[in-house]
Image (cartoon, rainbow, N blue to C red):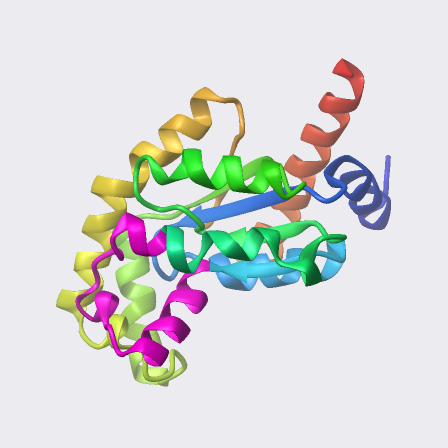
Amino acid sequence: METMEEKIEIIKNWLKTGSINIFGLPMSGKDTQGIRLAENLNAKFLSSGIIIRAKEAEVKKGYTDHGALIPTDIFYEWVLPYFSRSDLTDFPLVLSSVGRWFGEENAVMESAKNSNHEIKAIILLNISEADVESRFEAAKILGDRGDRKDDKDLETFRTRLLEFREKTLPVLQHYKELGLLININGDQPRDAVYDEIIEKLYKKAISAEKSA
């Protein structure tokens, strides 16, 4: 039985400079788990949400102020160039919801592959809408989400949930059909979520090695 450290090394050897893309409802823990995973895999972490919010502040657009996804052409312009950045060339990537609108996943996979960051796995943190609403309310009380306009009130947050349901679920179905999707129980303690991610990535890496 391999230790956690040994499993991580096996994942690294399988991933090389490839990418793992993490999806889930708002408040499901994508960035929390993604940052931890990137640190342990010696990978670079890229969040489309962080990129977009920074860019919006720069150009004063505010597409996401009301909880809606940015238009696909703007996503292509703002986010996809990150795959070919020279400072990321030699590293694997852990992505947080890069390509959330159905159809964008094809451009994401192409950009990743062309820059030697081929998408190797898609992680879905499964958690109910009721549970993420509870997390949202708790976060508002604690004030630990910063001054995010897309988290300003419950109505805006529910728009984000609707966007996920209508636009992102078809993306995940496509990845499932390609055999890339890994389902994770997101409704458990953070360490347990992380352990399940490592275990399932490890199994995928072992399976890929056996079929090579």
Say which residue appears at 45% left-offset and 29% top-offset: 175
Is 61 in the magenta? yes
Q: Which residues are magenta?
A: 48-75
The relative height of residue 101 versus residue 160 in the rendered view (above or below) is above
Residue 62 can be seen in this image: yes
In this orientation, which residue lies closer to the viewer: 23 or 53?
Answer: 53
Residue 6 x, y percent position in the rendering = 86, 44
Furthest-left residue in view?
Answer: 155
Residue 99 x, y percent position in the rendering = 40, 46
In this orientation, which residue lies closer to the viewer: 114 or 94?
Answer: 114
The relative height of residue 38 versus residue 149 in the rendered view (above or below) is above
User: Which picture quadrant has residue 198?
Assistant: top right
Residue 183 can be seen in this image: no
Q: Is residue 60 left or right of residue 25?
A: left
Residue 115 x, y percent position in the rendering = 63, 43
Residue 69 x, y percent position in the rendering = 26, 56
Q: Which SS does the magenta portion mostly show?
A: helix
User: Which picture quadrant has residue 59?
Assistant: bottom left
